[in-house]
Amino acid sequence: MHPTILEFQIMAAQVISSPAVPTPSLGEVPARLPAAGLKDKHGRTITDLRVSITDRCNYKCVYCRTGSEGAQFAELPLADYLRIIKVFVNLGIEKVRLTGGEPLLRKDLVSLVTQLAELRTLSGQPLDLALTTNGHLLAELATPLVQAGLSRITVSMDAVEPHTFERITRVPGSFQKVLAGLRAAQRAGLSPVKVNCVLLRGFNDNQVVPFAHFSRDEGVIVRFIEFMPLEEDRLWSPDVVVPLTEVVAQLNSFRPLAPLPATHSGETARRYTFDDGLGEVGIIAPVSQAFCGACSRIRLTSDGKIRTCLFSQFDHDLYGVLARGGSDGDLAAFIEKTVAVKEARHHIGEPGFLKPSRSMVHIGG
Ligand code: SAM
């Protein structure tokens, strides 16, 4: 049986430490940095770290937030994220995506990006440094972020029709702000900008073809994402999900789609252009065509907890190791043990599916 909203909110407010991964006793673990990279027990190599730097958000997207909840978890000083990220990078992380909440709300974000851009992967390359944002504050920040070394940006936009957009974000004027932010990012050199659109049946599923036009007109890559049960409230049901097959059919009815190859082995999106080669759209289908077998991700929440899967029932308290005075070796050992127990897959839509212990805005998308 599903928990009630109240039970869910209580669960989300709790910090649950996994019994499977006890905090190492400090001092027992020798400082060491393995060269082989981070592996889980299912043989997957983890190269992609998502870091939420706040769970505050200036939007109240209807499918994500109740509208009455604020931030629920602490945020760390940016220096603590930097230290933790360095340890992850020394273990084999190659991509770091800053997210939230809304990451542009963090003062000194540009300084964090500057310092992250100086890090090198195990093979001596700069990090692939990306940011996911709602774009509301991007017009002012795009150029400083590029100058600081940001490589890529994803802007979340769930409609290209302003009224629909603002019904979703519940912030008047948001469409024009985000459009200005997106264009500023392109001018600053972050082209092509990726645009993420979560589709909900009966709400914005009429935006698929308009987004195809948007991709072609604005020169952005649009990614349609299936809605996952990660909302603060309870509105997810399989009927609300607009599956990949349906999006493909709508796009094909506009113009014939032409598949594009994956850009890398852990690619989560099915990529397409159109028959004339103009525009790029992609579909990320974690519900109808799960890609857990190729998952290369791990997440750090704003309060310094590791989440091994969006749908985990537990957080792993990495910040606790740091707060107790742990060395970088202690942090590394904790990370390795935690990654090892990463879940094989999620169970969305299966009988007995349990909602995760945090919602998307409090994990970091
Ligand atoms: N505030 C930033 C933003 O809007 O992009 C970053 C955080 S937001 C939680 C990250 C992404 O998660 C957004 O693209 C959002 O649309 C997506 N998201 C939120 N809830 C979701 C859900 N239940 N299923 C799928 N995607 C979701």
Image: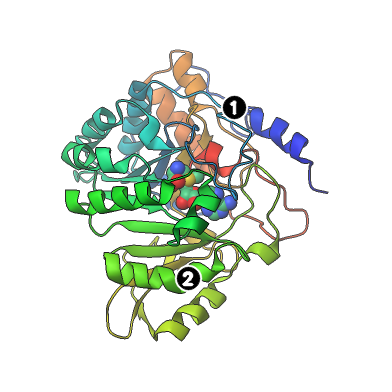
Does the rendering let one see residue 256?
Answer: yes
Counting every numbered tag in the picture gives 2
Residue 140 image offset from top left, x and y in percent = 26, 38
Tell me which amino acid carries mark 1.
Pro
Q: Position of residue 95 (x, y in %)?
A: 32, 46
- Closer to us: 58 or 75: 58
The dot on residue 304 is: none
Query: 330 or 132, which is in the foreground?
Result: 132
Q: Quickly name the residue at label 2.
A: 208
Residue at the (38%, 19%) spot, across then down: 327
Direction from residue 189 to residue 230 in the image, left or right: right
Q: How crowded is mark 2: few (under 14 residues within 10 Å), some or many (20 or more)?
A: many
Q: Closest to the observer: 199 or 43?
A: 199
Q: Name the residue under label 1.
A: 22
Residue 41 in view (yes/no)? no
For ligand 1, tell me if the residue under mark 2 lies within 8 Å: no
Q: Which amino acid does label 2 sit on?
A: Val
Element class at badge 1: loop
Compared to residue 249, the image places residue 179 above or below, namely: above
- Give SS at disc 2: helix
Mark 1 crowdedness (10 Å alpha carbons): few <14, some 14-19, many ≥20:
few
